[in-house]
Image (spheres, rainbow, N blue to C red):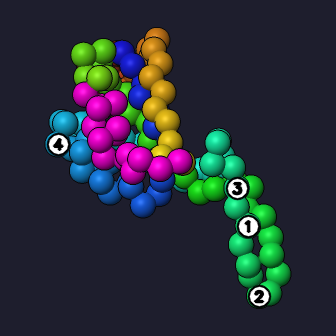
Amino acid sequence: MKMVMAIIKPFKLDDVREALAEAGITGVTVTEVKGFGRQKGHTELYRGAEYVVDFLPKIKLEVAVTDDRAEAVVEAVLKAAGTGKIGDGKVFVYDLERVVRIRTGELDGDAL
């Protein structure tokens, strides 16, 4: 089993959600986060005062899938979230050791 985590631009969330649905993914966890990479921050003007925005708003998606579905998830995110500009985000894939569905006690692949 794999956990696919993606950090994307907020306005791309609907596109990515639709792409995942088309790929047959039925569950995703979405979290609003802040951060920066090479994009760094930027300065904004508010009521005549200039201030630095160090941490930019991003969306973190987490999708737990079986090993054979992980590449489809990665491809769906890459196609839907990409703009070709700095700050598009990243996709991380890592192993899941164990999954348990709380309601039924199902384990691993059955719990997904």
Compare residues 78 and 32 and report the one nearer the observer: 78
Question: What is the crowding at mark 3: few (fewer than 14 residues within 10 Å), some, or many (at least 20)?
Answer: some
Compare residues 60 and 111 and report the one nearer the observer: 60
Q: Label 4, on which residue?
A: 22
Q: Earlier in the sequence, mark 3 or mark 4?
A: 4
Q: Classify 6 as above or below 94.
A: below
Residue 79 percent coordinates (x, y): 29, 41
Compare residues 97 and 4 and report the one nearer the observer: 4
Look at the image and tell me in which quarter the C terminus lies.
top left
Depth-wise, is mark 4 or mark 1 nearer the camera?
1
Instruction: Tell me the tag on residue 33.
Output: none
Q: Label 1, on which residue?
A: 43
Check if mark 3's residue and mark 2's residue have beta carbons within 8 Å: no
Q: Earlier in the sequence, mark 4 or mark 1?
A: 4
Question: What is the crowding at mark 2: few (fewer than 14 residues within 10 Å), some, or many (at least 20)?
Answer: few
Going 63% across and 48% down the picture, which residue do you hit?
Answer: 39
Q: Amino acid at mark 1?
A: Thr
Going 74% across and 82% down the picture, which residue do you hit?
Answer: 46
Cα gap from disc 3 to disc 4, whole angstroms:
34 Å
Magenta stretch holds residue 46: no
Q: Classify 73 as above or below 7.
A: above
Q: Amino acid at mark 3?
A: Gly
What element does badge 4 sit on?
A: helix
Cα gap from disc 4 to disc 2, whole angstroms:
44 Å
Cα gap from disc 4 to disc 1, whole angstroms:
38 Å
Q: Label 3, on which residue?
A: 41
Check if mark 1's residue and mark 3's residue have beta carbons within 8 Å: yes
Q: Main secondary structure of the magenta part?
A: helix
Q: Classify 61 as above or below 75.
A: below
Residue 36 percent coordinates (x, y): 66, 46
Depth-wise, is mark 4 or mark 2 nearer the camera?
2
